[in-house]
Amino acid sequence: MTSVVDTDSTAATESTGGSAGASRPRHPQRPVWEEPPGRVAQGLKGATLAVVILVVLGPLWVVLATSLSDEQTITEAGGLVIIPDGITFDAYWRVLSGGVVTRAVLVSVGVTAVGTAISMFASVLCAYGLSRSGSFGHRTILFTLLFTMLFQAGMIPTYLLVDSLGMRDTYWALILPTAISAFNILVLRAFFMNVAPEMIESARIDGASELRILVQIVLPVSKAVIAVITLFYAVGYWSSWFNAMLYLDHADKWPLQLVLRSYVLQQQSLPSSGATSGIDAMGQVPSLAIQMAVMIIAVVPVLIVYPFVQRHFTKGMLTGAIKG
């Protein structure tokens, strides 16, 4: 069999002229999809990636260029600007000059920070308890979490519960109803179950408590999944606007995403801004530029954080999913 393969390979090589850089002949016993791609396939991959990058970054560039343009450039472009004629930061100065957008940014940052800390604290403790098969109520709590992934109470019962607990028109209404994610807990649990049991048993023999085992042994080897789940919670809090629309009665408590929805998508005037179509009342700055500036401010934090966590995605998610 080896001689036949070598003969076929030699013949195929000679048929290509033996030139350097010629494509390697396909092994007769190897599937097509396991062969290294040729030049045409590599070119198609590069072209596809270039198109995807343009589709993703194109709209973001248009939004950024419009936010950095003055009134004359936007008027000449008929709206959205592709190539700015000069750069001005007036829209950002107006947005961040202490008005409703600045307050909304501070609200979103606070809710995201506090909410993510509470969610990670509760999720890590719950996941670690569920990863120990002999823990109290292990099976009952696990099935309860799985049940909540399939069936939910609905919006009206949730609203009545939040109102009866006195959380309506408070920031806690933006945090506590979504503080726990059953999916994130199950991912953490699957990862914690893969921690070497020998390490945990050795710590128990040395007299370590469960809390010490979690903090000093389990968490240090679970940095990847912790980073991923933290990002999931943080992005969820940062992007949330529906709970704010339901539970907040005063506009001065709005998070950034609700301001973005009301001002940019629904074309409403910002509270106490008195914005008019064409020119914003806070100064000679086009309202379209200010709308685009608000969008950039809402997107930039996620774009900054994501590259630092991206390298943990494969290890953090797939390890728990496959081995758990």
Image (cartoon, rainbow, N blue to C red):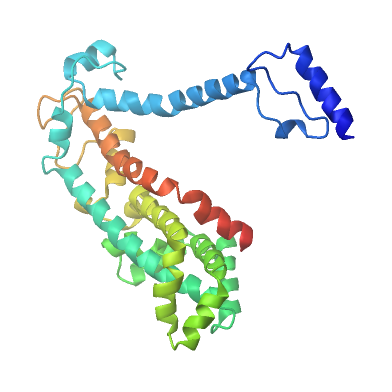
Q: In which quadrant is the N terminus drawn?
A: top right
Nearer the observer, 160 or 256: 256
Q: Residue at x 14, y 38 (%)?
A: 273
| Of 33 and 117, the residue lying toward us | 33
Does 92 sit above or below residue 41? below
Q: Residue at x 34, y 46 (%)?
A: 305
Query: Image point 35% across, 29% down: which residue?
Result: 60
Which of the two residues, 292 or 228, is positioned nearer the viewer here? 228
Above or below 275: residue 313 = below
**Extreme residue toward the front, this view:** 3
Vertical arrangement, residue 290 with respect to residue 161, above or below: above
Q: Nearer the viewer, residue 37 or 247?
A: 37
Q: Position of residue 220 (x, y in %)?
A: 41, 66
Residue 280 appears in the rendering: no
Image quadrant containing the C terminus: bottom right
User: Is 262 situated left or right of 313 in this image?
Assistant: left
Point out residue 281 in the picture as x, y percentages from the top left corner.
12, 30
